[in-house]
Amino acid sequence: MNLAADLAAWRAPVSFGVLALLLVWESVHPFFGFFSKGPRRLRWRLLHGLTNLGFGLLNGLAIRFVFLALWVRTMQWTDAHGFGVLHWLSAPEWLRWALALLLLDAWTYWWHRLSHIVPFFWRFHRLHHSDRRMDVTTANRFHLGEITISSLLRVPVLALIGCGLEQLALYELLLFAVVQFHHANIGLPERLDRALRWVIVTPHLHKVHHSIVHTEQNSNFSSLFSWWDRLARTLRLSRDPRRITFGLDPARAETNAKQPVSSRR
């Protein structure tokens, strides 16, 4: 429990540190010039950022004061009863930690994909995709309804995995740092992005996911580790990320019907 508390305590400073670093990076060398022209550019950027961070604050409070206790009780129950995959396997501690991160991230991939496939889930998730000026603050832009549904569905997932609070805390710490990174309005040298995207989701990959083009929007569902898209053949790259337009296609804003997605490296 002490390790879990330590990891949880690190989440806020790490998140704010990554946010501050990426905000500076976006200001000095933005990939898209969303807020680079006009006398009101600073006001527009502040309004955009504060709106997205407001969603994040509301969702964070809901998780902290409503759902966290439910998750903790679930993990305490699985530990007391030896329930879940990690309790059923006889494996060294390092392997249990690795499996916990992998299984938690596999669920995150499938939940994200379901949010695009299931019309009821898409009604909430489309708020995230409605941001036409994606930057680091967009990582916080989620509907409270989506957070509520995903937090409730996480209860049986945590039980089936049988992970501990320490493992969940580490996963959340890594997840949100990478999520902020790949939402940021930045670009990496192509060789560096190519190398990183074998392991984690990069700005290139996630820009494609936020495209207004339906086939691109329904690809690249991974959040932390990028290999789920390779395994599920939902990976898609863009030859020129600068041509991407973010937002929602008005013809598909209400429903995001399932379509086959081709893989392209």
Image (cartoon, rainbow, N blue to C red):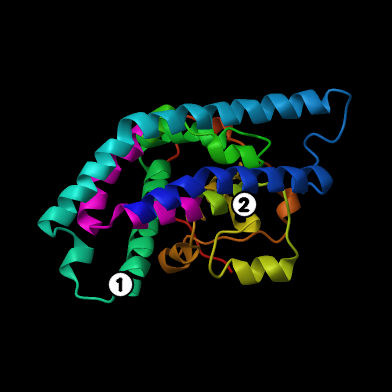
Above-or-below relation of 68 to 77: above
Q: Quadrant of residue 105?
A: bottom left
Task: Pick out the residue farthest to the front.
Answer: 2
Under mark 2, the amino acid is: Phe
Residue drawn 54% across the image and 45% down it: 214
Q: Position of residue 167 (x, y in %)?
A: 35, 58
- How far is the residue under mark 1 from the one under mark 2? 29 Å
Mark sitting earlier along the chain (1/2): 1
**Residue denoted by label 2:** 181
Residue drawn 37% across the image and 59% down it: 106
Under mark 1, the amino acid is: Glu
Q: Main secondary structure of the magenta part?
A: helix
Residue drawn 10% across the image and 55% down it: 81
Residue 69 in the magenta stretch? The answer is: no
> Which secondary structure, mark 1?
helix
Task: Look at the numbered discs 1 and 2 and tell me whether their residues touch, using CB distance below 8 Å.
Answer: no
Q: Position of residue 174 (x, y in %)?
A: 49, 55
The range drawn in magenta is 148-175
